[in-house]
Amino acid sequence: MDKTGKPKRIGILTAGGDCPGLNAAIRGVGKTAIVNYGMEVYGFNAGFLGLINKDYTILKESQLSGILTVGGTILGTSREKPYKIVKSDHGETHKPEMIKQTYSELELDCLVCIGGNGTMKTAHMLAMEGLNVIGIPKTIDNDVWGTDVTFGFESAVQVATDAIDRLHTTANSHQRVMIIEVMGHNAGWLALYAGMAGGGDIILIPEVPYNIRSVCKKIEKRYENKKPYSIIVVAEGIEHPKKGSAASYLAEAITTYTDIETRETVLGYIQRGGSPTPMDRILATRYGAFAAECIANECFGTMVALKKGDLTTVPLDEVGGKLRLVDPNHQLIQKARKMGVSFGDEYMQN
């Protein structure tokens, strides 16, 4: 209830790329808000477009049942960036003003924005406009600043690891180099974790500069040591000189320099789809339920986060525009190096 005794009315939206666990987070917010706090919940369709176009659904508890295990998002999503000037028949319209108008007309007490880095940046800007906003971090890239982990990450690691496991058998059968490219424009968390879980021989991530000669030397050394195949796990965002995918560049370069048959696999959107893992369901639910608690306590202008296993909040002004990247000296990288895993920088080090 608000100070006048009316039930609090909140909005929820999912923005940016989809990932497993979005429905679990919607359910966590909505069920806790309705059942425990007696709030009214409005779901906005297609991310920030729903606010701009006043396109929403009033969510009842019954609509939130049965969605915990379902991939995607019942609210839909988009990559709409509202902080731009758009043209209309009546001249220029400022989208944030349209969002503020919808927020005001529906008499919302808070807006819950579920998304990644771009969504958190927009959420902060809306908070600066005077809206009560709470963010929930999601992304398979695990690169949202301020939290130890985002939901969607573990599910993507599982998908990527399963793919690597399957590539081991065909790589061994044909004695080939197999390259698997996973998502991660700026952050290599997914490649690092899937590469380690799947037994990758070479892991290339944006945060660790690599040298193609180091990669080729590692492969040749493995063949000299009677290891007839190699698995390379690469993040899509590594630097390379060609227009195509990172995997295609590496395959061409390795074949040219070593004359060893090389094949590439780009997982692409497969990593985002499907049902979330049990741990992602739990994490998304925890984030959602905690967000509803934060609304009840009027802890606005924050993003819910997990730090050392505990739920907490981080001010949105500390999150927007920042990335959580892999430290090149991360413990997992250090352990991997001691096991003989290459990160493509040995030649540069020597």
Image (tube, rainbow, N blue to C red):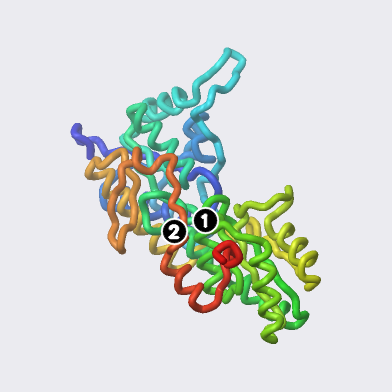
Query: Can you see residue 159?
Result: no
Question: Does residue 237 appear left or right of residue 55 in this picture?
Answer: right
Query: Can you see residue 145?
Result: yes
Mark 1 vs 2: CB contact within 8 A: yes
Which corner quadrant of the image does residue 97 belong to? top left
Question: Does residue 76 appear left or right of residue 290 in this picture?
Answer: right
Of residues 165 and 284, which is closer to you in this image?
Answer: 165
Query: Residue at (28%, 43%) from the top-left corner?
Result: 295
Residue 173: percent from left, percent from top: 75, 83
Question: Does residue 85 appear left or right of residue 320 in this picture?
Answer: right
SS type, badge 2: loop
Q: Which numbered circle lies on residue 327?
A: 2
Please give the residue where the numbered disc 1 appears in the rendered image. Answer: 207
Tell me the kind of residue under disc 2: Asp
Q: Considering the image in quadrants, where does the C terminus appear?
A: bottom right
Tell me the kind of residue under disc 1: Glu
The relative height of residue 235 versus residue 166 in the rendered view (above or below) is: above
C-alpha distance separating marks 1 and 2: 7 Å
Q: Considering the image in quadrants, where does the N terminus appear?
A: top left
Q: Residues within 10 Å of mark 1 (few under 14, many from 20)?
A: some
